[in-house]
């Protein structure tokens, strides 16, 4: 059983911020949170793994969360810019909090640009529901609702691009957060 996973299992984004991120500044630096959690993160080149998984040229591995024994590691593509890397780290942290089994000796979750269809298995390898949950977690972690509301009151009606730049997240994540607030 992984002690670190047990400690963070079922944490909500607000719990993560309250427990592991004492700063009030934005953008939120997920690397700081991971360091306080004792989770190592590394920027890597996934080219060989992508080839081994038969990924097509229009798909790429963005991040991997894995646990082995008492260690948790998050790997992210060395081709990502700062905002995308921060998002992928938050997304993979979500898998650690929500999806990595606490009792497993070894487990891996992958984040790709597109859902992977495996020729070997003749089916999709990843469940969209897990990816959507991880994205909602990442959006809530990187764009806390209270901070977004403060920003909207201060600025008025900013564009999605402006919100994404302020919180240093990809535009699709800012759009997801805004869409959640509309519901």
Image (cartoon, helix red, strand yellow):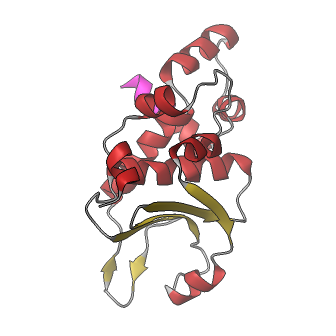
Residue 32, position as x, y percentages in the image: 63, 41
Of residues 64 and 157, the one drawn nearer to the viewer in this rendering: 64
* Number of numbered markers: 0
Q: Above or below — where is 79 with respect to 154?
A: below
Residue at x 42% of width, y 41% of height: 136
Of residues 88 and 120, the one drawn nearer to the viewer in this rendering: 88
Q: Above or below — where is 56 with respect to 141?
A: below
Dividing the picture into quarters, in which one does residue 99 lie? bottom left
Residue 160, position as x, y percentages in the image: 63, 32
Residue at x 61% of width, y 58% of height: 41
Residue 33, position as x, y percentages in the image: 57, 40
Residue at x 57% of width, y 21% of height: 148
Instruction: Provide the residue span drawn in magenta.
Output: 177-183
Residue 117, position as x, y percentages in the image: 40, 78
Screen quadrant of the N terminus: bottom left
Determine if the magenta segment contains residue 31: no
Left or right relative to 120: residue 156: right
Name, please, the residue furthest toward the left: 103
Left or right relative to 3: residue 155: right
Q: Above or below — where is 39 with respect to 179?
A: below
Dividing the picture into quarters, in which one does residue 165 lie? top right
Name, please, the residue furthest toward the top: 153
Determine if the magenta segment contains residue 178: yes
């Amino acid at each position: 059983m992984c002690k670190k996973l047990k400690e963070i299992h079922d944490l909500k984004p607000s719990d993560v911020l309250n427990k592991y991120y004492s700063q009030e500044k934005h953008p939120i630096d997920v690397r700081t949170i991971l360091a306080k959690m004792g989770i190592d993160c590394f920027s890597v080149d996934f080219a060989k793994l992508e080839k081994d998984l038969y990924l097509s040229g229009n798909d790429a591995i963005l991040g991997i969360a894995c646990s082995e024994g008492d260690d948790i590691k998050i790997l992210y593509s060395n081709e990502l810019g700062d905002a995308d890397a921060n998002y992928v780290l938050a997304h993979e942290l979500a898998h650690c909090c929500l999806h990595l089994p606490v009792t497993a000796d070894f487990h891996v979750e992958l984040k790709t640009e597109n859902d992977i269809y495996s020729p070997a298995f003749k089916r999709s390898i990843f469940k969209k529901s897990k990816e959507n949950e991880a994205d909602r977690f990442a959006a809530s972690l990187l764009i806390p609702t209270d901070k977004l509301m403060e920003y909207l009151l201060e600025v008025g009606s900013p564009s999605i691009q402006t919100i994404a730049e302020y919180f240093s997240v990809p535009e699709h994540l800012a759009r997801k957060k805004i869409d959640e607030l509309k519901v």
